[in-house]
Image: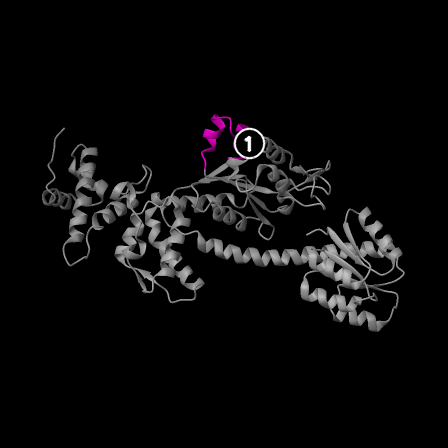
Amino acid sequence: MPLNRILVADDEESMRWVLSKALKRKGFTVDLAHDGRQALSLVQDNNYDLAILDIKMPGISGLDLLDKIRELKSDLLVVIMTAEASMKNAVEAMKRGAYDYITKPFDLDVIDAIIEKVGRAREIAGQVTMLKQELKERYQVEKNIIGNSPAMREVYKTIGKVAASDVTILVQGESGTGKELVARAVHFNSRRLGKPFVAINCAAIPKELLESELFGFEKGAFTGAVERKLGKFEQANQGTLFLDEIGDMPLDLQAKILRVLQEREITRTGGNQSIPVDVRIVAATNQELIEKVRQKEFREDLFYRLNVVPINLVPLRERREDIPQLVQYFLGRASAEMDISDKQCTDEAMAVLTAHSWPGNVRELENTIKRAVILSSDPLLTPRDFEGLEPLSGGQPTVSHDASLESIVDLKLRSCMNGIEKLEKGDIHAMVLEQVERPLIRFILEKTRWNQVKAADILGINRNTLRKKINDLGIELKRD
């Protein structure tokens, strides 16, 4: 957290002039106040990294101003100046929360030492705050990535393999699948834990502003640039920069991103100095970047720079076996946020949720659960609480060609059971097993050319058991 903007308040014009000139020479933005009231107004209207206050000023004294600053901006560090080198003043200033205390007259070397000391203090304070926040977020991220489907297990394995390195990652998936959660999981499991995680949505910022948001700008670079601003690359230095929806980035800016990846340095807008940056890049998109490359809408060289390790998040409709677990998680979180008793879904409601297409993916599911929890006064949520949710393809949900066998069976089973209003005692277990076993045994027999010894061995059952199942299931034997 480098110092940038400093307030100097002193009723002596010569002191204001000397400090302003010395600080500006070192690249700081300096605001001046000739008395305590003007200084208080500036503190109320602006954000400062350091305030240097004279102890005796008209209107409001330096010590009284220090009290008000502690109330308004408790994180603003204050240095008190005085011409009276009394122990009473020093003790009183430190008791009221001053960071340091200096006696006039002083050499400018003293100010240099103070600035360096303040910079180190701010850096340490920033690291402590960041560690607390990141540990909190890490706990939340590890709780928020829900799912035990084969597709999600592959995601977890990939995160585990690449997190410790600095390799660039491209996360691809539809909107609402949790791309930022994956990016945060990579960061929180890397050696960069404790350093910044900075996210920027490339689609949410007008293209004429995106460059200055990424690279920062110098004072006077354009109308309205009243002070220097650090961009996302510098803010993320030594940490991770998450470039969300990078497929929407303009081509001219893509070239500059490519240069940063190659050279590991940036230049602020309006500046000419190259600034080294140590940043790990995790990019994300809901678009088919390779198709955009073919259409000349995305740079091919940047695509291959970003796509070192791809992580693909499948849509929720292709990992339906995770839906019950997600529902339980969102039910608990919604109840906790609203401080109400936990609610549960009936089996019929869960079947409706599992069969829905979820075009908005996990985000849509979360909002649907939250809405139902808010609107329902009953502790049990029924299909009535989820009216308007329709299964895929007019009642016949579908899955992708690479979906797991479990998800296919689960989806088909729920589809078949949706029309049953009430489940009663019967032979459903035997019926379902029969319908699964028959095609399985027939398939293995076909693969072994109807050799029952080989088929029994592959199935893991003895030959007599296989023969009985063939008879019970009415499987017609064939001969090649």
Residue 215 drawn above or below residue 62: above
Is 300 covered by the magenta stretch? Answer: yes
- Camera sees residue 308: no
Image coords of residue 89 (percent x, y): 82, 71
The correct choice, above or below, for 153 with respect to 86 in the image is above
Residue 230 pos. (x, y %): 67, 45
In the rendered image, is residue 401 in sight? yes
Q: Which residues are magenta?
A: 287-308
Q: Is residue 78 above or below residue 196?
A: below
**Residue appearing at x 69%, y 43% in the figure:** 224
Whether 98 is among the magenta residues is no
- 420 with respect to 361 (left or right): left
Which image quarter: residue 265? top right
Name the side, left or right, on which 449 lies relative to 128. left
Residue 115 is situated, as x and y percent measured from the top left of the image, at 78, 55
Q: Residue at x 34, y 62 (%)?
A: 376
The residue that label 1 is drawn on is: 302
In this view, the residue in front, 52 or 441, is: 52
Image height check: is 78 above or below 429? below
Task: Pinpoint residue 348: horizontal percent, then vertical percent.
Answer: 25, 55
